[in-house]
Image (spheres, helix red, strand yellow):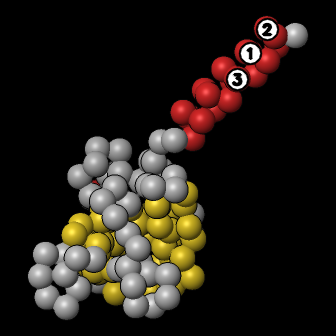
Amino acid sequence: MIQNKSYRLIIALIVGLIFADPPNWDSNGDGVLDNYNDYENNGSITAMVSTDGSSSFSASGDMIACFVGEEQRGVGLAASVPFGPYAGTYQFQMMIYSNATSGETITFQFYDQSQNQIYYLDQTLEFISN
């Protein structure tokens, strides 16, 4: 019986390590969509994730990604704002890519590193090429 409990504990630890990895939104960690060359057009946004519309809860290590349907079209890494009205908050600068010049609906997902959790954000945006 002791051997069986040890086996379960080892499995739980292995599963915990597998799910501790961040999403594969940016495999090389540079904050740029890995397959951006597949698209003709791009547009840029700066975003802040908040819980109540005014206070940011992002931190270093957090990520945001945008999608058209299930296809990832952009990624942004959290960066601390050093000055101005948003000093001390974290924001995401992101390039969004498309083969259309406009009209696609962009949805967003947020990865909270401290919670190891992905959140589907209810904000959408229409893609418009810069």
Kind of residue at disc 3:
Leu
Do the residues under discs 1 and 2 have CB atoms within 8 angstroms?
A: yes
Q: Nearer the viewer, residue 78 or 102?
A: 78
> Disc 1 on helix, strand or loop?
helix
Q: Nearer the viewer, residue 111 or 16?
A: 16
Q: Distance between the Cα atoms at labels 3 and 2?
A: 10 Å
In the rendered image, which residue does mark 1 sit on? 7
In the rendered image, which residue does mark 2 sit on? 3
Q: Distance between the Cα atoms at labels 3 and 1?
A: 5 Å
> Disc 2 on helix, strand or loop?
helix
Do the residues under discs 3 and 1 have CB atoms within 8 angstroms?
A: yes
User: Where residue 38 sits in the image (x, y, percent)?
Assistant: 33, 58
In the rendered image, which residue does mark 3 sit on? 9
Comes first in the chain, label 3 or label 2: 2
Visible in this render: residue 99? no
User: Where residue 88 sits in the image (x, y, percent)?
Assistant: 22, 76
Visible in this render: residue 6? yes
Count of numbered circles on the image: 3
Q: Nearer the viewer, residue 33 or 61?
A: 61
Which image quarter is the N terminus in? Answer: top right
Is 1 drawn above or below residue 127 in the view shown?
Answer: above
Is 68 drawn above or below residue 48 in the view shown?
Answer: above
Kind of residue at disc 1:
Tyr
Q: Distance between the Cα atoms at labels 1 and 2?
A: 6 Å
> Disc 3 on helix, strand or loop?
helix
